[in-house]
Structure formats: C-alpha cells, structure tokens
Image (tube, rainbow, N blue to C red):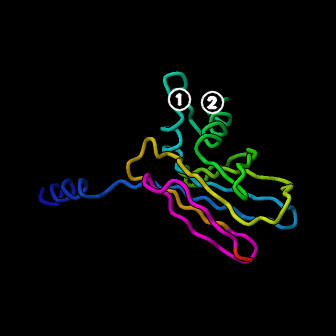
Amino acid sequence: MVKTFILFIFSFLIHDYHITHTTIYYNKKSNSFEITVKVSVEDLERSLETEEFKKLRIGSQRESKIADKLIENYFNKNFLLFINNNQTDYEWVGKEIDDNLHDLYLYFEIENLTLDSDIESLIIENNVFLENQENQINLARIEFEKNDYNITFTKDLRKKEVIFNK
C-alpha cells in the first residue's frame, strides 16, 4: 500500500518530455543534404490527427493511405531550412518504423545543390510538435564536411543559424 502511494506521488513529479532527433548530413559526393528525423509515432499522430483524419495508425498494417502526404506537408510547414540565407526545399524520401514500434524514422533529402557559391551557413527553423507538447525538445546534429554541430530547439528557441568553418 505504501509503495503504491509513493509510486503514485512520484509519477506526478516526473516531467513528461518529448524528444525528436534530427541528423542533417552533407554528402559531398552527391552534393546533397540527407536528413533523418527520429520521432515518436504517438507524438507524430497527435500533431497530424484532426477531426477529418482521426485514425492514421502510422507504422501499422492498417496505416491510412494519406499518412505519408500528411507527414510531408507537416514537415514542410514546421521544419524549414535556409542555405546561405535562402529557403531551401527538401524532398520526402520515406519512413521506417523502428523495431520497438514506438519510434519512426523519417527521411528527406536536398539533392543536387546548385549554388552560386560555397555553402557557408545553414539556418534551421524547427517547430516540430511544439504546438502540442509543452516540454518538447528537438535535437539536431549537423554533419558538414569534417565538422559536427549540435543544436537543441525548444518552444523558446525555434530557429538557429550554423556558420560552417572550412
């Protein structure tokens, strides 16, 4: 009885954190950025489901036929990239459910970068799940040539610029 009461009280003291992890890798051979975003299926569905699209069942055998399009549209609005201060579109590649059935890997790519100059900076605006989760944390790792950069996005820090050191 006492153990149950302590567990009950302790459960209220724990903060519920929601985390995404993004890796942006610059592939010099193909002159492209490869983007992988690891998200919780539950958090993604919470952000995508509306009165019109109630049961998406992402990652299951009964996944909604419109799930991929909804994911792509959501990220196009909530995850913005600017290369050398110019907004840059990326393409949806696909998704993969983790073996734990809780996490989902989303894949995007910016192919064949055609720029007038070298890549000097990358601005990331990451608003993923911030509309629904008070304690949302979005981690990003940028791998550019020989340098790695780590950024943490929150409701108070949604946009960050990385200046590449060559």
Residue 159, image x, y percentages: 55, 55
Instruction: Answer above or below: position of 60 versus 50.
Output: below
Disc 2 is placed on an element classified as: loop
Give the quadrant of residue 21: bottom right
* Residue 152 magenta-highlighted: yes
Instruction: Answer above or below: position of 101 versus 143.
Output: above
* Residue 10 magenta-highlighted: no
The dot on residue 64 is 2
The one nearer the camera, 96 or 86, is 86
The dot on residue 55 is 1
Mark 2 or 1 closer to N-term? Answer: 1
Residue 113, image x, y percentages: 84, 56
For the point 43% across and 41% down, the residue is 132
Residue 51, image x, y percentages: 49, 23
Give the amino acid type for the residue marked by disc 1 in the picture.
Lys
Dots 2 and 1: beta carbons under 8 Å? yes
Magenta-colored segment: predominant secondary structure: strand
Instruction: Answer above or below: position of 45 versus 10.
Output: above
Disc 1 is placed on an element classified as: loop
Residue 7, image x, y percentages: 21, 58
Horizontally, is 148 left or right of 131 in the view? right
Q: Report, in whole angstroms, how far the alpha carbon at label 2 lies from the one at label 1.
A: 7 Å
